[in-house]
């Protein structure tokens, strides 16, 4: 059995070796460190639309309603999926929507209410890291909706 190092000698080991010994990965510096950003408080939501006209209408509406700070439209994606027992392949437009994570349920409900598909794709992923000024801007632009959606009557 190998001998254990005294605690005083552990201070001399590089952090990476200590974390390997403990089984956890070494802490990585975050580009957002030093900011007030809370990891996961902003999300990127993805919605597919049948064409650019529908995507632009939904994008404009979610930005006007402050459910999103920004929507990128990515044209001409190909989606292959199974629907009602049949493999389908369609050309679609992908919307990448930046919003506060707390607004994802309201965003989802709005998209479902205006989307032409029987089952609209709305999926969201939390943003763990990024450009602090951009993430702060996303929160500022959508802040009034977030405040009113969590306010008590």
Image: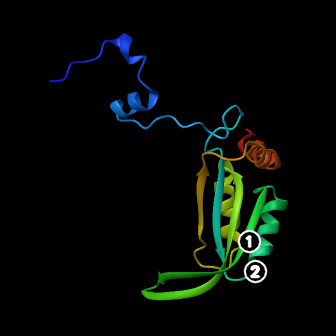
Pick the front one: 101 or 126? 126
Residue 60 appears left or right of 12 = right
Q: Is residue 46 above or below residue 145?
A: below
> Disc 2 and disc 1: Cα gap in Å?
8 Å
Residue that carries the numbered disc 2 in the rendered image: 52
Which numbered disc covers residue 139? Answer: none
Residue 140 appears left or right of 118 = right
Q: Position of residue 33 (x, y in %)?
A: 66, 34
Give the quadrant of residue 125. Answer: bottom right
Q: Position of residue 82 (x, y in %)?
A: 46, 82
Q: Position of residue 71 (x, y in %)?
A: 75, 64
Element assignment for label 2? helix
Q: How many marks?
A: 2
Q: Is residue 104 above or below residue 50?
A: above
Q: Is residue 21 above or below residue 96?
A: above
Rendering colour mode: rainbow
Within 10 angstroms of label 1, few (less than 14), some, or many (20 or more) residues? some
- Are the two marked residues, 2 and 1, in contact with CB atoms closer than 8 angstroms? yes
Give the quadrant of residue 9. Answer: top left
Q: Earlier in the sequence, mark 2 or mark 1?
A: 2
Q: Is residue 50 above or below residue 113?
A: below
Give the quadrant of residue 116. Answer: bottom right
Name the residue furthest left.
1
Residue that carries the numbered disc 1 in the rendered image: 73
Picture quarter with the C terminus = top right
Q: Residue at x 77, y 48 (%)?
A: 134
Q: Residue at x 65, y 57 (%)?
A: 44
Q: Position of residue 78 (x, y in %)?
A: 59, 82
Pick the front one: 15 or 141? 15
Within 10 angstroms of label 2, few (less than 14), some, or many (20 or more) residues? some
Element assignment for label 1? strand
């Amino acid at each position: 059995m190998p001998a254990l190092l005294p605690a005083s000698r552990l201070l001399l080991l590089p952090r990476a070796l200590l974390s390997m010994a403990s089984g956890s990965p070494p802490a990585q510096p975050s580009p957002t460190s030093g900011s007030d950003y809370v990891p996961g408080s902003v999300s990127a939501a993805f919605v597919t639309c049948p064409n650019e006209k529908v995507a632009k209408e939904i994008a404009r509406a979610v930005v006007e309603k402050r459910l999103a700070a920004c929507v990128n439209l990515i044209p001409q994606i190909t989606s292959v999926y199974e629907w009602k027992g049949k493999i389908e392949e369609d050309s679609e437009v992908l919307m990448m929507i930046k919003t506060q994570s707390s607004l994802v349920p309201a965003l989802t409900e709005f998209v479902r209410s205006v989307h032409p598909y029987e089952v609209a794709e709305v999926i969201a992923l939390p943003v763990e890291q990024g450009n602090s000024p951009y993430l702060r801007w996303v929160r500022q632009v959508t802040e009034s909706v977030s405040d009113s959606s969590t306010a008590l009557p």
